[in-house]
Image (cartoon, rainbow, N blue to C red):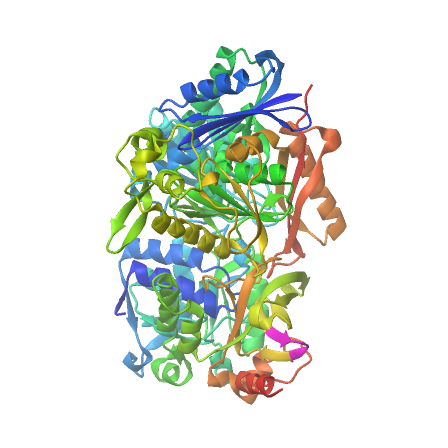
Amino acid sequence: MIRLGIDVGGTNTDGVILNSANDVLASAKTATTQDVFSGIKKTIQTVLSQTDVKAGDIAVATLGTTHCTNAIVERKALNRVGVVRICLPSGTTVPPLLGWPDDLVNKLQAVTILVHGGYEYNGEPIAALDYDELQAAADQFRGKVDSIAISGVFSPVLGDQEKAAAAFFEKELPGIPVSVSSEIGTIGLIERENATILNAALMTTIRNVATGFERALKDEGIDARIYFGQNDGTLMTSTYAQKYPIYTIACGPTNSIRGAAHLSKEPNAIVVDIGGTTTDIGVLANSFPRQTSIAVEVGGVRTNYRMPDIYAIGFGGGTQVVPADDTWKVGPESVGYQLTEKALVFGGDVLTATDVAIGAGFMEIPEAQKDRLRDVPADEIYPLFIQKVEEAIDRMKTSSEDLPVVLVGGGAALMPEKLQGASRVIRPNHASVANAIGAALGDISGTVEKIFMLDELSHAEAVEAAKAEAIAAASEAGANPDAIEIIQLEDFPLAYLPGNALLVRVKAAGPLLIS
Amino acid sequence: MNLLNKEDIEHIAVGAAVLGTGGGGDPYIGKMMALSAIEKYGPVKVITVDDLHEHDWVLPASGMGSPSVLVEKIPSFEQLENPLRTYEQVSGVQASVIMPIEVGGVNSLIPVAVAAMTGLPILDGDAMGRAFPEAQMVTFHLDGIKPGLVAIADEQGNTVTIQPKDGFWAEKLARMTTIAMGGSSIVCDYGITGATAKKSVIPGTLTLAKEIGKLLHEQRTADVHPITQMLDMLGGFRLFKGKVNQIERKIVGGFTRGEASLTGIDEDEHSAFKLFFQNEHLLAEKDGKPAAMTPDLIAVLDEETGMPVTTEGLKYGARVVVCAFPANEKWRTEIGIETAGPRYFKYPYDYVALETLVKEGHSK
C-alpha cells in the first residue's frame, strides 16, 4: 500500500511517499501558498516527479494542516455559532463564552441560549429537555447562525438529551451543522463547551480544506482514501474530520514528533523541530509525544484537550538578526516563507539565521551567494543560536541525564553536530519532512470517557466496558477491527460521591482498514 | 485590596490552589463564578478582621460536595443566594459580612460571588488557613463554637436547614443532604458575631492567597526562583525535589485516598520520598521517616513554574518540588491535632511539628 503524506505549515508544505514498510520513497518541500491548495498541488507534483510511483498507485492520502488552528488564532473565516446549553435550573452563574477574548466573541456573533435539562452524575435527569425552549432557540437561530454547538450537564455520562436536541435542530434548521459536546470533550462543562463552540465555528473552514484537498488529489490523478491528522498522533477519516475539525488543532507538532520517532528509531528522545519562524521542542516518550497535564488554551480559550507538551521559541531559518547595543538580537521577527527572496544569501537585504549559519560554515546551500556575507560577523552571532536552543532543550528535560536529541524540520541544518544536554545529536535522513512522514504514519483511534458506579459492577468490568466502547469507536472511525490495541488507559475515583464513582478514560488505536 | 478587581481574583485563584495542598477543588470554576457575579452585580469590598464591629454578623458561604460535580452542574445565582436568605429568615439575624470558610481551593472564591450578589463585603480571613475535607475541621470547632444553623441549597430551589448538636453531626447530615442534592451544594453555617470572628478567624488569608498568586504570575521576570520566594513568604521548608514514579488511588468512605512514590533528582538523588493523600496531601515521608504531617501544609509544586499540582493532577514522570509550611497555631494545639492530625486520618504517627522534623532530618 502506497501512502502520500502532506503537512501544511505556516511556511512550507511538505510531502512524502511511503511504501507499505513505511520507507520513504520520495519527499518534497514547497512554499505554502496563500490559497494553500496550489501549494499542495505543487508538492504532490514535485514528490511524484522523484519516484517511479504512479499517481494511480497511491491508496491513502493523509493531510496534517494548520488551517483550523490558524482560523482560530487569526480569527478568520469562523462561522456564526448558535450556542445551546442544556443545564437549567443549574449553570446560570457561569454563562457560555465567559472569559473568552472579546475579538473572538465578536467574530462568532454567538446567539446563546440556556434550556432546561441535563443530568446528575449518575445519569438521573436534572430536568426533562424542554422542547418549547428548543423551538424558541431555533426561531432565534434562523438566519443568524451558520452552525450550532450543544452542551449538556454530565453529557459524558449520558448523551441522550444532547442527541435529542441535535436531532431537533437538524429537523428544524436543515443544512445547519450541529456539534454536540459529549462527542468532543471530557468532564468539565465549561472546557467541553468551549471546545464544542470552537468546533462549530470551524465547520466551513474544514469543509473547504476537505474539498480543496480532494480536488488537488483528483487534479493530480490520485484516487485515494483521505485521512486527516489529529493532535494525538492518530488519523481520522475525512467524513469524521468534517464533524470534528477541532481534533486537527496542534497536529503539526505531533506529526513532527511522530515522524522523528519513526526516522530515528529512538523511543525516548528530545525532538527539536526547527521551522522558518519557530522552533518547537517536544519530548518523545515510548514513541508518542509527551502530553501536557494542564488545561490548554487555544486562541485564548480554555479547553480540556490533551495536547502534546511543546515548548516553542521564536527561532527558525527565517529569523531576523539585528544589531542591539554591543550584541545581536535574534528574532522573534522572521521573514518566514519569503526567506528565498529576503535573505542576504538569496540577494535580499535582511540578515537571517540562515545567512549566519552559512557564514559560520555550519550550513551549505548550493545556490547561496556567500560573497554577500563578507561583512557579517557570523562566528560572533552563531553561538547565540546554539545557546537559545540548548536552553530550551534543558527546559523540556525531566532529568539532568543527557538524552538523544533528534533534529528535524526545514531548519535542522542550522544546528551543529554537538549540543549541550544531548547524549548524541541525530539528524535522520528526510529530517526536513518529518512532519509529513508523521502525518502519513498515523493509526486510527477512538476515545471513551465515562463514569461507572462500582456498586453496580466491578472495577475490572468497568474497565472492560470502557475498553470495548473505545475499540468500537476506533473501528467506527476507520481502524482495522482485528488490529486495534488499547494505547492509553486511566481511571480516577471521584471523591465525595456515594456508590464508588469511577471515571475511566480509554484510547484505542489500530492501523487503518483498507478494503 | 479595598475592592476586588479582576486581577486580584485571578491571583487569588492561583494562591488558593497552593494553599489547597493538592485538594479543595480547582479554583477555576469559583473564579468564573466570582467574575461573572461581579460583572452582573458590581464590585466586592474587602474588609479586614480589624475593620469588623463587635455586633457585625459574619456568615461563611461555601460549596460542599464533589469538585467533579461542581465543574459540571454549576450553581445558579438563586442557589448562591438561597442559603444566606434562608439562614437569615430562620435565625432572625441579618448577615453583614460574608467570609470564606476555607481559603484553599474553590471555596476561596465561591463566597466572593455570594458577596457580589448580596452587596455585602467579604472578610479577608478564613477558618482553615488551607483546605480540609470535613466540615468540622475549622478553627471555630477548635474554639468550641458550634455550627449553629446550617442552610444548604441546590439548584432546584430546595433549601434544607439543619440544627446539629455539633460539628461532627453538621458534617454527617450536611454531607447526606448534599448527596441527595446530586453531590454538590452551597452551604452557609457557623454564623458568628464580629467579636467572635476577631478571636477565631485566621486573618489575612485572602491577601496571602493573592500575594502567592501574584508571585507565581510574575515569576518570569523574577531573578529568584518563585518557589524560593514562596518559602520566604510563608516561612516554609523545601522538603524534596523529585520525579513521581508510582501512584495508587482508591476510594475509602467517599474520599479518595492514595499514595505517590517519588525518586529524587539533583541534590535529592539518593533519597526516596512518599506522599500520602486523602483529597489533600496529608503526610510526607523521606527515606521512610516522616518529613511533614497534617495539619501542617504540604504543597506539591511544579519544579519549573512553581505552580501547584493537585492530587488528581499527580502523574507519573511529573517533576516536582515538595514544600511544607507550618499550619496556623490553632491547629497545633491538642484539639487541633485531634481534629486534623495524622491519627484522625488513620496514619500511624503522632503529630510532630514541621520545624522539629526538619531539624531532626538535618541532624542525622
Magenta stretch prevailing secondary structure? strand
Q: Where is residue B261, by image quadrant?
A: bottom right
The residue sitting at 39% across, 27% down in the picture is A367
Q: Residue B321 location in percent, x, y? A: 53, 68
Position of A326 relative to A335 (above/below): below
Residue B284 inside the magenta-drawn segment = yes
Q: Residue A417 location in percent, x, y? A: 52, 46
The part of the chain drawn in magenta is: B283-289
Position of B244 relative to A193 (above/below): below
Q: Where is residue A164, by image quadrant?
A: top right
Q: How many labels does the image show?
A: 0
**In this image, A131 relative to A323: left or right?**
right
The residue sitting at 44% across, 40% down in the picture is A115
Position of B214 relative to A382 (above/below): below
Position of B184 relative to A134 (above/below): below
**Quadrant into which the C terminus of chain A falls:** top right
